[in-house]
Image (cartoon, rainbow, N blue to C red):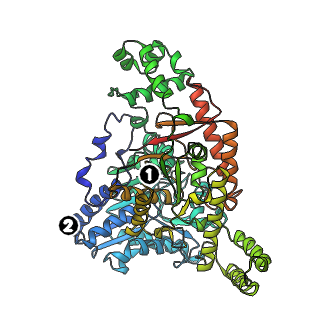
Amino acid sequence: MPGAAAAFPPASKVFDGPRDRERLHTVVVPDHDDLATLIADRIVAAIRRDTSAKGRCALGLATGSTPLGVYRELIRRHHAGEVDFARVVTFNLDEYYPMSPESPRSYRRYMWENFFDEVNIPPDQVHIPAGDTPRERLADACAAYERAIADAGGIDFQLLGIGQSGHIGFNEPGSAADSRTRLVTLDMLTRRTAAADFFGEDNVPREAITMGVATILEAREIALVATGEHKASIVRRAVEGEPSPDVAATYLQGHANATVYLDLAAAAELTRIGTPWLLGPVEWTPSMTERAVVWLAERTGKAILKLTARDYTEHHLSPLLAKAGAAGPINGDVFNRLRDRIRGRRKLPARRPVLVFSPHPDDDVISMGGILRKLWENENTIVVAYMTSGNIAVFDHDVRRHLDFAERAATLLGADPAAVGRLHRAVLAHFEQKEPGAVDLAEVQELKRFIRESEAIAALESVGLPASAARFLNLPFYRTGEVRKRPVGDEDVELVRRLLEDVRPEFVFVAGDLSDPHGTHRMCKLAIDRALDGYTATKPEVWLYRGAWQEWAITEANVLVPLSQDELRAKTMAIFKHQSQKDTAPFPGAHDDREFWQRVEARNLETAARADRLGLPEYFAMEAYRIER
């Protein structure tokens, strides 16, 4: 958030505490948006310092979704006259190989579209590995890249992300500490992660050119940035684990001026965030007590009400035991609070206006198909707003199938068979010459939108809601025809605000799983938050749902909604209505190979099973929700 730096103290103060297990200086902020401000501060300071001292500043830059907020903040500051890039030299970390510089997937194009076009850096001061270099000249080109960095006096400030394999740049597991710029073979997990950008894993290049570990470590300052729940595990390995070639990010532990910047989701598995009582004294708030007791129950394999004083003392929880005087009162209080979160249909809203926001046309039934049916049975007035068309997630073969049907049925439907046939042939010709991931014809984009909308209607009807409950917002930020989207703008926010004014909901459901492969959930939540900020009527109660990429833990959720076996089956059948996402989804996410219905079934069953193991009432399955306000 521009200008918000003063509103937040440094995260090291917000989430401070013993860091005995952290081998890297780590800053954790409450929200990922604040990372952009913090890192932009450091980059601007480096530019001012080094251009003043030696006439230029060399920046090492990263690509992907993580640094986009940083680049937008730097652009804002440049346009405000706060930073000058005329004497900045840049070196990008990596590039896919082979890769045309004009390809929508090239990092060269990414950098110009997302940063260089908006600032005054001279083009001849930009350096990006050339993905179109002939293979026989690659070794010379990599050596020349190293010389260019040396000629610039080395990198003053290096911006890094971290891959799920622990790579920095494309230094995959096994990379040596003394490695330099070179051609590498990409890890399977890295290619799976990139599949969303390439419209399928098969289209992801198998190689890349990358700065080496030694090149990165020679930078004078390093900032590694990570956001999202899906990065939490590898972040903990990088920050708290032993240095190892298996996780290249652990090499940063040997750097004198490296800092890791995390949002709270990415930091969740660090000891000081996840289990801070293992490091020293903590404030035993109700929330902290609840987390510790659930952790203890799961660690000992006991139900909450069966935990003993000995369990507490043997697992570093003596201070909590001493505060309460005995195990019984602690156990009873936590058990009662968790039990009270379970809400069957009779404890859910009834006869109220309810607005459900679904980022893609299937997120509603994937994440809250069970509660949707219950809310309808409770005679609530429900509107389900599908925020984006989801059209880029439709395979070409689905369009072929629907066009074949349309041409065959044209006469019966009262359409002009010749016109339908011409469109069919034009689309087939387009598909023949289209490269994977290329932007579709406008007509094809619309056809794919119609496919997703018809599936959404069928899924709603499957959980009992009428087609009239659906609203298709088709927000402008999504309408690029590419995986990369525009920033959320005023028009997006205004469309959401007008819907709020129309529905006047008392309850709003919003996607809270922000680890989707291309950031749409995060951007949709931003649009909703901004619209609610400007909403003048009585503010609704906001429930955050998850499901597609993770589920709320019992200690994070405010509401647990039980589902019977029949209700879970009905929810699964609703997900099946999204045929274009069935069997093989274009953007499944790299950290889970299962289909969406399989993930949902497993997570809902596990939430109920976890509650059962804690000694809570036993149910077949459960959905979890977090009330935000």
- Looking at the image, is 602 positioned above or below residue 390? above
- Label 2: which residue? 53
Drawn side of residue 528 relative to residue 418, left or right: left
The percent position of residue 260, horizontal first and vertical second, equals 38, 49
The percent position of residue 318, horizontal first and vertical second, equals 39, 17
Label 1 neighbour load within 10 Å: few <14, some 14-19, many 20+: many
Foreground residue, 38 or 337?
337
| SS assignment at label 2 | helix
Q: Which quadrant is the C terminus positioned in?
A: top left
Q: Which quadrant is the N terminus positioned in?
A: bottom left
Drawn side of residue 338 relative to residue 90, left or right: right
Give the label on residue 120, or none: none
The percent position of residue 65, horizontal first and vertical second, equals 46, 61
Foreground residue, 260 or 313?
313
The percent position of residue 188, horizontal first and vertical second, equals 63, 56
Q: Residue at x 74, y 80 (%)?
A: 414
- Label 1: which residue? 505
Q: Residue at x 24, y 69 (%)?
A: 83
> Does the rendering let one see residue 218?
no
Amino acid type of the residue tagged 2 in the rendering: Ala
